[in-house]
Image (spheres, rainbow, N blue to C red):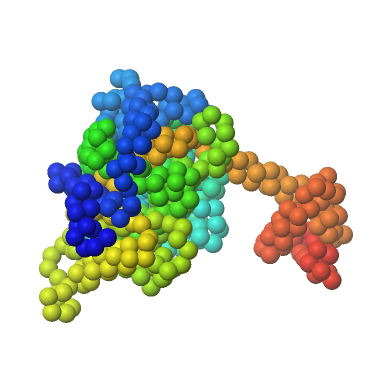
Amino acid sequence: MNARELWDRYRAWLFDDPELGVRVDVSRMDLTEDFIRAMAGPMGRAFDGMEALERGSLANPDEQRRVGHYWLRAPELAPSEEIRRAIESTVVRVLAFADRVHSGDITPSHAERFRHYLVVGIGGSALGPQFVADALSGPANPMTPHFLDNTDPDGIDRVLRSLGPDLGRTLTVVVSKSGGTPETRNGMLETAAAYRELGLELGPHAVAITQDGSRLDEIACEQRFLERFPMWDWVGGRTSELSAVGLLPAALQGLDVRGMLEGAAAMDRVTRTREIARNPAALLALSWYHAGDGKGKKDMVVLPYKDRLALFSRYLQQLVMESLGKERDLDGNVVHQGIAVYGNKGSTDQHAYVQQLREGVSNFFVTFVEVLRSREGESIEVEPDATSGDFLAGFLLGTRQALYENGRPSLTITVPDVSARSVGLLIALYERAVGLYASLVHVNAYHQPGVEAGKKAAAAILELQRALLKVLRKRGEDGGTCEELAEAAGETDRVETAFMILEQLSANPARGIVRTPGTTPFDAVYRYRTR
């Protein structure tokens, strides 16, 4: 297309809602009017499904539960008065609790004020709060955020060492719906041990966000946590940012919780329209479908041109990939659906993988996220009539053009600033787009059997490790090779896993497993020695 044709196409396909504060440009995604007409039926069914979801239909048959994250910012839509009151009262309680912490009404056991908060969670219990904390942080925030989001001992040590004595001025927020998530439980136990090293207890410095009656709920009661907030079974982890999971950390940091909720509610209202040209979530879903032929053939590369949105791609990885990555469709057919998501930030990636995006394998489409406001206050000119922000905008537009010239599709989402409202808009936009796309490809966006399978496999491996340690302790100095120990444990069909477990144990001296090398790695002898 020549420049005039591109301009006409841009004008024809641009979604622009000044009141909402969002633009979505799909003009470079090669959509056609014929494609939109052909997808009218599937999109109508997708809208029907979204409406049923918001009315409280059973959306997750695996767990026999509804999916109601949209009610979090529109409690009046909740299917019962009880749920509506629970949502509204939780927001009030979250804000009141944060105010009492900030005012010094709630204090640590041996310090004047809480100055830090530490979120212990995994997946959606950490990714959303991390994204929001980084995006909206400011010098006036009353508390500094920290996160334990893995069961990596070295990573745990790094976070706890960074706090040091300030752990005594840290409010720990433990997030687990069931209370049995191993990574979160481990992080809580490690944090409790760190408190004890300072002569303190976890309870007077902790808050739980969990389901009523869960194991974590019981622990919070037993150890007298400062407060307990709900995680409802109708909110999934990857869509929990606008529940207490995300709102409490944001409120503790002093962020605009109401603004996030208002932004998400505004996006929800707009994306309920069935007029595709006026529905930005529908435009995204159809663009993804068209780019990947409805089979996820193209990866989604997310490039926000704003440092504050650097974690947005990580947040979207879980939201998109856990929701859409499914082996079977709703009829039980094997389909292997999904969209791979990766990205970082512009213009950093001008110097990383944009070279491949322009000239390498064409297996992707790019999502540019543009923020119009460069900074608060004035900017110096780094060149005549050009600021640093002008360069950033120039790199975005230049990269968009360079990709198009080589036949690489892209779409652009524009927001005025990185504010609480804008973050709420982006969260809701992608939640709606994922739900609509899932309907188009006929998969359940609200369950995650693959994740559960991984958890079960990990539990089986830990059982094998316990069996190997039992054999090693019994044998003492005699020890054995991986094959001998696996046979003694009655696990001859799992020698490979036994070898890997033994290698990991022997690499950590404190575990008491000593490795004597053999002629090959597989002839090594492992022995248990008391400390």
Question: In the displayed structure, would residue 456 be above or below residue 345?
Answer: above
Residue 369 is situated, as x and y percent measured from the top left of the image, at 29, 56
Number of disc labels:
0
Task: Give the residue displayed 23% in from the left and 48% down from the top.
Answer: 13
Task: Give the residue displayed 85% in from the left and 49% down from the top.
Answer: 487
Task: Give the residue displayed 23% in from the left and 58% down from the top.
Answer: 6
Residue 351 is situated, as x and y percent measured from the top left of the image, at 38, 73
**Quarter containing the C terminus:** bottom right
Residue 416 is situated, as x and y percent measured from the top left of the image, at 19, 54
- Residue 530 is left or right of residue 158, and the answer is right
Location of residue 348 by image quarter = bottom left
**Going by the picture, which residue comes out furthest to the top?**
81
Closer to the camera in the image, 128 or 64: 64
- Residue 346 is left or right of residue 234, and the answer is left
Residue 239 is situated, as x and y percent measured from the top left of the image, at 39, 40
**Quarter containing the N terminus:** bottom left
Closer to the camera in the image, 47 or 312: 47
Task: Give the residue displayed 35% in from the left and 47% down from the top.
Answer: 287
- Residue 526 is left or right of residue 41, and the answer is right
Residue 486 appears in the rendering: yes
Closer to the camera in the image, 263 or 254: 263
Residue 167 appears in the rendering: no
Location of residue 71 by image quarter = top left
Question: In the displayed structure, would residue 422 be above or below residue 456?
Answer: below
- Residue 234 is left or right of residue 214, and the answer is left
Question: In the displayed structure, would residue 489 be above or below residue 307?
Answer: above
Location of residue 228 by image quarter = top left
